[in-house]
Image (cartoon, grey):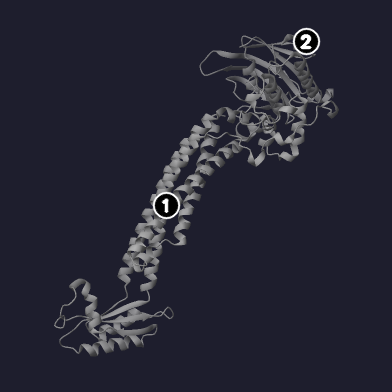
């Protein structure tokens, strides 16, 4: 091949993309968009489940944090004892305990107000033996020895009891674990369904492009290279579907939060704890990434298996 | 040619009593034996349907013998799979009778495909691909898509694709079937030149006039059996 007999060098701007930009396996057009729609719908459900799990876990942590620095001493009225003296003694014992910052005796009016949600307002409760309460504020460090305080209360102030909310906290932990476990199961199931749809679509694509695959192999492409071409394409479709579904779920959650805010006059307490946090959106974005990873892995495996059978 | 090297080097293609049938169908190739030394040039001839394409596909490891043994480059090909199979294929270049160009890629991309799938960077082969395309007369069609190429242009693109990775063995199935006699001669001389440089060539054709232009061994397939016409 001598350059002197060759025609003038052609215009290389016509060469077209090669390397990274080259689409060696042609697009499937409509089939690809159908798969994106299916993945988006499944990702929507998975992102809602993941977002809800993060919300519940985060709210539970907030509640746990809030009440883990509080405890209550309850002194039941005893006709044979001086109730005010018992209250004072119980408060004194609490204040003597290292790690208890404050011990505030709630007045009888405060105690009666706490009963209003159950008994209604405007009732005269002066004849009823309403238990009296002492609100304790606990320090983070040193932590108070509440079991020792409970023992001393039992000895010095019979009829008193110490509630450190541990029963409520353990119920909260159980419910939170249940909800998170349920959400993780839902995410796994939905990702599994996505994997099934992607596997089906990959087998269709590789069969549809069998002629291209055969040419690639005959010109020296390794099976891994061919599988990588399909894996890249399906990972891209998975990411696109995942992003659409996750974005829709995030929008739905934000819409719900806005509605709740309006109804709760600024969103405090329970509603504030359920407002979406950056972690909620991170969990939803992770669903899109997981969709891409699952799509790529499933496509890779499906194509490798196809090539092994049709060698 | 270095005679000692040619006589001691293993055969490029060796078939011992090879038979082939699709499924439970009739035998397409029967008791085919063949021993092609390195740097040899052979025409593969025979009437349509005699099994020329099947024999080429067998050598290309696209299908497997149903009986007998096929050895390539001195090694057995039984149970070849995965990367090992790919290594064998990379030592061969093929020109299909139906071209097998990828319609969604330009002529340049089609010709560059063997180098691309082997992981070469474009910068290392761009000039070579363009020069080869010029040589086969497609210098002004490098950006054209195969559906817009004529039969002869497609054939030349397919030949360029088979040659670009400098294979040790070229299998060409009717590579001059769609070109005019002048271009057919030019393409034939390209194969002869490659053969002189050390590439073994098996060229399937039933163009007797073309075969008469080159002093080369002739393999003739008739009813699935192979005859040698030295």
Q: Is residue B74 visible?
A: no
Residue that sits furthest to the right in the current view: A4
> Which disc, if any, is residue B212?
2
A276 vs A168: above or below: above
A206 vs B65: above or below: below
Question: Is disc 1 placed on a helix, strand or loop?
Answer: helix
> Badge 1 sits on which subunit?
A
Q: Which residue is mark 1?
A: A249
Residue at left offset 56%, top offset 13%: B27
Is A68 positioned to the left or the right of A219 in the image?
Answer: left
Residue A99 lies in quadrant: bottom left
Residue at left offset 38%, top offset 65%: A273
Location of the N terminus of chain B (image quadrant): top right
| Label 2 crowd bin: few (<14), some (14–19), many (20+), radius 10 Å | few
Q: How many numbered marks appear?
A: 2
A60 vs A123: above or below: above
Q: Is residue B22 visible?
A: yes
Residue that sits furthest to the left in the current view: A127
Looking at the picture, tell me which residue is in the foreground, A134 or A264: A264
Looking at the picture, tell me which residue is in the foreground, A257 or A35: A257
> Badge 2 sits on which subunit?
B
Residue A91 lies in quadrant: bottom left
The spot of residue B198 in percent (x, y) is: 79, 25
């Amino acid at each position: 091949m001598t350059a002197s007999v060759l025609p003038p060098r052609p215009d290389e701007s016509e060469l077209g993309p090669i390397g990274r930009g080259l689409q060696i396996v042609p697009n499937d057009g409509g089939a690809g968009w159908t798969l994106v729609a299916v993945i988006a719908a499944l990702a929507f459900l998975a992102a809602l489940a993941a977002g809800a799990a993060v919300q519940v876990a985060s709210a539970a942590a907030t509640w746990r944090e809030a009440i883990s620095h509080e405890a209550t001493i309850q002194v039941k009225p005893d006709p044979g004892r001086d109730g005010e003296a018992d209250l004072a003694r119980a408060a004194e014992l609490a204040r003597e305990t290292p790690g208890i910052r404050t011990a505030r005796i709630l007045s009888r009016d405060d105690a009666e107000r706490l009963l209003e949600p159950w008994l209604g307002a405007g009732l005269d409760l002066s004849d009823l033996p309403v238990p009296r309460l002492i609100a304790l504020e606990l320090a983070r460090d040193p932590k108070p020895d509440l079991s020792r305080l409970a023992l001393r209360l039992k000895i010095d102030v019979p009829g008193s009891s110490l509630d450190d909310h541990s029963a409520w906290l353990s119920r909260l932990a159980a419910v939170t674990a249940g909800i998170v476990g349920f959400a993780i199961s839902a995410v796994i199931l939905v990702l599994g369904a996505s994997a099934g749809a992607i596997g089906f679509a990959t087998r269709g694509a590789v069969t549809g492009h069998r002629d291209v695959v055969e040419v690639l192999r005959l010109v020296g492409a390794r099976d891994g290279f061919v599988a990588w071409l399909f894996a890249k394409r399906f990972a891209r479709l998975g990411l696109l579907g995942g992003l659409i579904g996750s974005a829709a779920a995030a929008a739905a959650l934000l819409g719900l939060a806005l509605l709740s805010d309006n109804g709760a006059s600024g969103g405090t307490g329970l509603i504030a704890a359920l407002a979406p946090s950056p972690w909620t959106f991170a969990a939803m974005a992770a669903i899109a990434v997981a969709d891409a990873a699952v799509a790529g892995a499933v496509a890779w495996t499906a194509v490798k298996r196809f090539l092994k059978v049709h060698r | 040619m270095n005679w000692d090297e040619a006589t001691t080097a293993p055969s490029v293609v060796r078939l011992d009593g090879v038979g082939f049938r699709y499924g439970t169908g009739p035998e397409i190739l029967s008791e085919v034996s063949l021993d092609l030394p390195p740097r040899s040039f052979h025409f593969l001839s025979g009437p349509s349907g005699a099994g020329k394409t099947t024999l080429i596909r067998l050598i290309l490891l696209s299908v497997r013998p149903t009986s007998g043994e096929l050895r390539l480059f001195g090694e057995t090909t039984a149970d070849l799979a995965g990367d090992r199979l790919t290594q064998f294929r990379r030592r061969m270049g093929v020109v299909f009778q139906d071209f097998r160009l990828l319609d969604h890629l330009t002529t340049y991309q089609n010709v560059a495909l063997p180098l691309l799938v082997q992981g070469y960077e474009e910068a290392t082969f761009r000039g070579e691909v363009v020069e080869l395309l010029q040589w086969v007369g497609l210098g002004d069609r490098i950006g054209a898509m195969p559906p817009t190429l004529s039969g002869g242009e497609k054939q030349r693109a397919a030949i360029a694709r088979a040659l670009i990775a400098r294979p040790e063995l070229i299998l060409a199935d009717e590579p001059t079937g769609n070109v005019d006699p002048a271009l057919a001669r030019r393409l034939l001389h390209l194969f002869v030149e490659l053969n002189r440089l050390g590439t073994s060539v098996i060229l399937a054709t039933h163009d007797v006039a073309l075969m008469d232009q080159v002093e080369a061994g002739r393999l003739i397939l008739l009813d699935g059996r192979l005859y040698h016409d030295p």
